[in-house]
Each structure stands twice: as structure tokens, then as C-alpha cells.
């Protein structure tokens, strides 16, 4: 009886471990944010992970800004960027080759997806 539970449990733990290795947030990610007024902004995030801390940069037509207050818990993360004195909090979930994120535009939220940039 113990063996019936132990083997599937070990296989599930191994699969989760492999997925955690494959799903790495480090690197460059590109996408487009649709703003509440209907405009589309091309963005590039360059994420750097150190334990449960997330840092890096975000680039858009408005320029390059740093990622502040970044945190990672499992496959979810959060951070903020400040553009022209305005804070834009982000929350997201990462997968192997994409991230789904929500950005707060002063009370209005917008969902968008970025994909891993594999170009060199």
C-alpha cells in the first residue's frame, strides 16, 4: 500500500522539479500592452532573478526604467516600474516560454502576454 502512494508521489515531485528548472524567468521577454485608452505599447522586459527577488529593466517607447520591489513566489511574480513619476504595479505568472501579466494603470487593469525573446 505504501509503495502505491510513494511511487506516484515521487514521480509528481520529480515532474514539478523539472518544470521549475525549465520555467526560468531570467532573460528578455517581449510583448505589447493595450492601455485603457486603446493604445498599444511595445515593451521589453529584461528579468534577473536572485532567489525570491526579481530585478531588471523594462523598455518601451517612453524609455528604459528599472524594475523595483520585485518578488517571486513559485511561478508568480510582482514588481513595479515608475515612468514619469507614475508607478505601474505588475503581477504575473510565468510559464516555459511566456508570461501572463496584469498591469495597473491607476485603478484600471490591463492583461497582456509577453514571450521569451530567443534572438541573440
Image: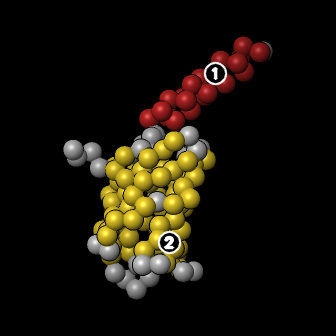
State the separation of the CA atoms marked 2 and 1. 41 Å
The front one of 32 and 2 is 32
Q: Position of residue 94 (x, y in %)?
A: 48, 50
Q: In this view, does 23 lie above or below 69?
A: above
Q: Nearer the viewer, mark 2 or mark 1?
A: 2
Helix or strand or loop: what does disc 1 sit on?
helix
Q: Seen in the image, is 117 located left or right of residue 85?
A: left
Residue found at the far right of this picture: 1
Q: Give me the residue at 22% from left, 46% from top.
A: 119
- Element on which disc 2 rests: strand
Which residue is found at the position 51% from the left and 60% from the top?
68
Q: Residues within 10 Å of mark 2 (few under 14, many from 20)?
A: some
Vertical relation: 63 (above or below) 36: above
Q: Say which quadrant the C terminus sits in.
A: top left
Measuring from the top left, give residue 36's x and y in whole percent: 44, 82
Q: Which residue occupies 42% across, 74% down? A: 83
Front in this rendered view, residue 65 or 94: 65
Identify residue for label 1: 10
Measured from the top left, where is residue 59 in percent x and y? Answer: 33, 64
Tag shown at residue 88:
2
- Decide which of 16, 43 is in the foreground and name it: 43
Amino acid at each position: 500500500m505504501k509503495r502505491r502512494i510513494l511511487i506516484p508521489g515521487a514521480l509528481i515531485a520529480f515532474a514539478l522539479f523539472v518544470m521549475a528548472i525549465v520555467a526560468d524567468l531570467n532573460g528578455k521577454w517581449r510583448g505589447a500592452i493595450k492601455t485603457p485608452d486603446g493604445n498599444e505599447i511595445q515593451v521589453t522586459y529584461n528579468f534577473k532573478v536572485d532567489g525570491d527577488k526579481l530585478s531588471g529593466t523594462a523598455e518601451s517607447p517612453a524609455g528604459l526604467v528599472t524594475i523595483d520591489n520585485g518578488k517571486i513566489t513559485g511561478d508568480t511574480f510582482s514588481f513595479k516600474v515608475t515612468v514619469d513619476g507614475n508607478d505601474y504595479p505588475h503581477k504575473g505568472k510565468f510559464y516555459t516560454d511566456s508570461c501572463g501579466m496584469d498591469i495597473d494603470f491607476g485603478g484600471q487593469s490591463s492583461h497582456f502576454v509577453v514571450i521569451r525573446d530567443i534572438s541573440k
